[in-house]
Amino acid sequence: MVNWVLRGAVLLWALFFVIVGARGLFDPSSYTETFGILVEGPATNTIRADLSAFFLVAAAAAAIGALVPGWLRALLVPAALYGTALTGRLFGVASGDPVNAGIVQAMIIEALTVLLMVGSWWVLSRPAAAADPAIASIDAG
């Protein structure tokens, strides 16, 4: 049962970030309202490509990890991406970058993403007998 809940949580997470990435791909100015990034001139192309790629690749890897039994390590891709983003934000804070409520919210989301992905990978990669104490006691007895 826990496996289904984790897979469902990862898929909902992936759906949300597919929407964020696709929205930014088709309308880069959506990143202005979401992240406070100014989208002007040639920077529009970079923002459209780089930010959308970040969200879409992370979401695709999470969905693959949740849906394809032999590909659980794909859950570590979004964990690495969001962990790196969180590390960059923490470095920025330590360096004196301005911080507002949006930055704090992003850091919380990034930390929760790392926990969800690593935790899901950990739980889903365990053998079924080891995950269920009732089955383990039947095997032992």
Image (cartoon, rainbow, N blue to C red):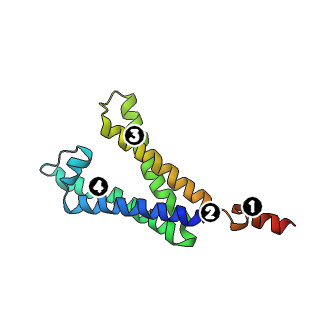
Q: Nearer the viewer, mark 1 or mark 2?
A: 1
Label 1: few (<14), some (14–19) or many (≥20) C-alpha neighbours in 10 Å: few
**Residue 112 x %, y %:** 47, 48
Vertical side of 105 occupied by 131: above or below: below
Q: Residue furthest top?
A: 96
Q: Are marks 3 and 1 in contact (CB under 8 Å)?
A: no
Residue contact between numbered discs 1 and 2, judged by CB atoms under 8 Å: no
Contact between marks 3 and 2 (CB within 8 A): the answer is no
Pair 4/1: label in front: 1
- Contact between marks 4 and 3 (CB within 8 A): the answer is no
In whole angstroms, how far apart are the C-alphas of marks 4 and 2? 31 Å
* Left or right: 95, with 133 as reference point: left
Query: In which quadrant of the rendered view does residue 26 lie?
Result: bottom left
Residue of label 1: 133
| Residue at screen point 31% across, 30% down | 97
- Comes first in the chain, label 1 or label 2: 2
Image location (x, y in percent) of residue 4: 55, 67
Which residue is under mark 4? 50
Numbered mark located on residue 125 in the image: 2
Q: Quadrant of the C terminus?
A: bottom right
Distance between mark 3 and mark 2 Cα atoms: 29 Å
